[in-house]
Image (tube, rainbow, N blue to C red):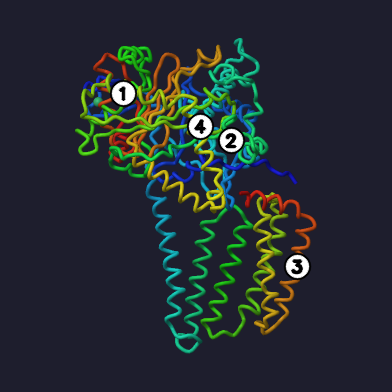
Amino acid sequence: MKHCTQCTAQIEGDWQHCPLCETPTPGEPSHSPFPAIPLNYSRRRVVRILFFSSIAVILGSFAAQLLLERGSASIGSLRSVWLGVITMWLLVVMAARNQRNIAKNTVTLVLLVGLICVYWDYLTGWHGWALSYAVPIVCGTSILALLITVRVLRTEVGEHIVYSGLTVLLGLAPIGFLVFGWVTTPIPSAICGAISIIALVMLQVFRGADVRHELAKRLDL
Amino acid sequence: MTRRNWVRLDNASNIFLAARSETDSKVFRISAEMDHEIDPELLQTALDTTYDRYSLYHAVLRRAIFWYYLQDSDLRPEVTTDNQYTCAEIYDARRPGLLFRVVYHHRRINLEVFHALSDGTGALWFLTDLVAEYTRLRYRQQDLPENTDTAQLTAQPGGGAEDTQARELTTDSFRHYFRGKQRPTEHPKTSSPSMSPTKTAYRVKGTRTPDSRTRAVELTMPVKDVLALARAEEISLTMYLTALFFESIRCAADGLGKSRTLAATVPVNLRQFFPSVSPRNFFATVRVEHTYGNGPDDIGTVGRALDRQFRPKATPEALEKKVRRYAKFERSPMLRIVPRPIKDVVLRVINWVNNRGLSVSVSNLGRVILPEPVESHVGRMGFHVSAVRPQMCAMSHAGLLTVSFTSPFVETDHIREFVRMLTSQGVDVSVAATRVTEAEFAEDSEI
Ligand SMILES: [Zn+2]
């Protein structure tokens, strides 16, 4: 074993210098109880910087839209390209931060895409396509996709039930669009509302106890 | 559907989540050194057996609106080589996994545990069972106890009844404690970090390690030599080591400047007074301090002064009072209706205020006794904790005392002083350190 003449102590491992006082250590190296694990500061820090700078650019881009004139007159199709690119970027960042919980990801996705579409529609002159088509279609297909996915992946009921429930509740929103007359075509909203109501009834009938159990757990005071 | 068991995480454990940071993962490691190179396959088999006995260790940590909770899982632990730096993060909110890991390196079996799951004593039980099972598999031909279950419970002081039920993640007992009308002090299942107002103490400063990993230095020495030194000063081993630690910090800092007070927090295992076989967190902390420059400051005087402060605070009555006060705080309706993220912030502030009054942490798991004939195959055992401030952890086995130092800093000056004070009194000390700087790694590759 190596030793330090200044500390008069044995040094385990293959230290050329005493880890405490840096005096050169004579003697034969021995096994250290601690393996030398290379430094890994670079990756973690880079990932975090990329994430936060991406979010900053994305939010900045969305905000910058307000400075430009509304409607298609000023920058025309360029705006749609810009919005398309940053939306895509946002979704990629979200996917990279992916949680394992598929239902939770779906809720986030529906909310993000829905809000962006409404904003987009507003910026391009409010033709009503977001509320008439985009939001109901995204909500409706998400519910169907989620119902299929959790079945195929055999996701545990407790894992997804609360977020599945939230997705279904979001699907009820288009019924409100119909009631307030915000839509140009009623069919997509009607279909989405119907899917949500059916899903909600099914949840209540088949999974009512599970939903209550999970909610009791998560809302436990 | 299989409805999983779950228990709400008590606030004492919550503080570990709130206080978790990039530099302090709130993970601790307990190691046992065997008399041979570890056989990974046997260790895996032993782990599978041990794991099945500890339902608590099956738990994953989940987030609810108002609390964190532990939930049963179907995950299986896997033995790996020691391929991450010591006390690397275990809990990741986005990828819930088991809250412990078992790794091996040459002759060592290391158990790393996220502190919200279990405390040192609880983890030591798990490691003891694991090592006993592993030894039984390894030395099959020899006469070893067939049933290693609860080996630790009969061997460890404070273990008591062979009640393996208590290691389970049972909803009922937990809810009973937090919701029932029963006086909490009859079965206190929780502990508390110090909540008393504290004055500020000297804070150790240093250079953070490049990738925020914990610097660990482990000292090994014959326990009888150090005990003799402590007895000569007529103080307990823990307080002797604490006094030595204070003196080392003072020497390394070249004087303490304006703040002449050094303060340490010392966890006390509550199981010794309130028998419990639950491996969940069950300790309370005691704060001791010494102000330099008011009279003699030699090791003996400081140690005796610390001892005088420590003893009255570490009685069952004093600890019960403290735990009770904390339990009351925890049950207050004001705190209960606060959503979890805000609770985290509140606890973080409490923790920050607490930290201002602390220079170092000291923890002693004491002498470990393993069931014969496992005992003879295990050499030194040690433990250390990821640390936000310099920390010292002591533990003894097989006649060897291991004193482990951890800190978020590169500097090891206080450890050098500590070692030299011991070696100058004729104690044989062996030093094992983790590499944390570029220069240290460069030196390693030269060979
Ligand atoms: Zn040295």
Apparent side of residue B51 relative to residue B216 in the rendered image (left or right):
right
Apparent side of residue B208 relative to residue B275 in the rendered image (left or right):
left
Circles 1 and 4 on the same chain: yes
Q: Earlier in the sequence, mark 1 or mark 4?
A: 4
Residue at the spot 28% in from the left edge and 40% down from the top edge: B205
* Camera sees residue B193: yes
Circles 4 and 2 on the same chain: yes
Residue at the spot 63% in from the left edge and 78% down from the top edge: A131
Q: Secondary structure at mark 4?
A: loop
Q: Which residue is mark 4?
A: B119
Report whether the residue tagged 2 is closer than 8 Å to ligand 1.
Answer: no
User: Residue A90 bears which disc, if any?
Assistant: none
Judge depth for marks 3 and 1 and give the one in front.
1
Q: Which residue is mark 1?
A: B305
Residue at the spot 46% in from the left edge and 49% down from the top edge: B346
* Mark 2: amino acid: Pro
Q: Secondary structure at mark 3?
A: helix
* Mark 1: amino acid: Ala
Q: Secondary structure at mark 1?
A: helix
* Mark 3: amino acid: Ile
**Residue B6: quadrant of the picture:** top right
Which of the chains bears the disc numbered 1? B
Q: Which residue is mark 3?
A: A197
Q: CA distance from mark 4 to mark 3?
A: 48 Å
Packing grade of label 3 (10 A; few <14, some 14-19, many >=20) is some
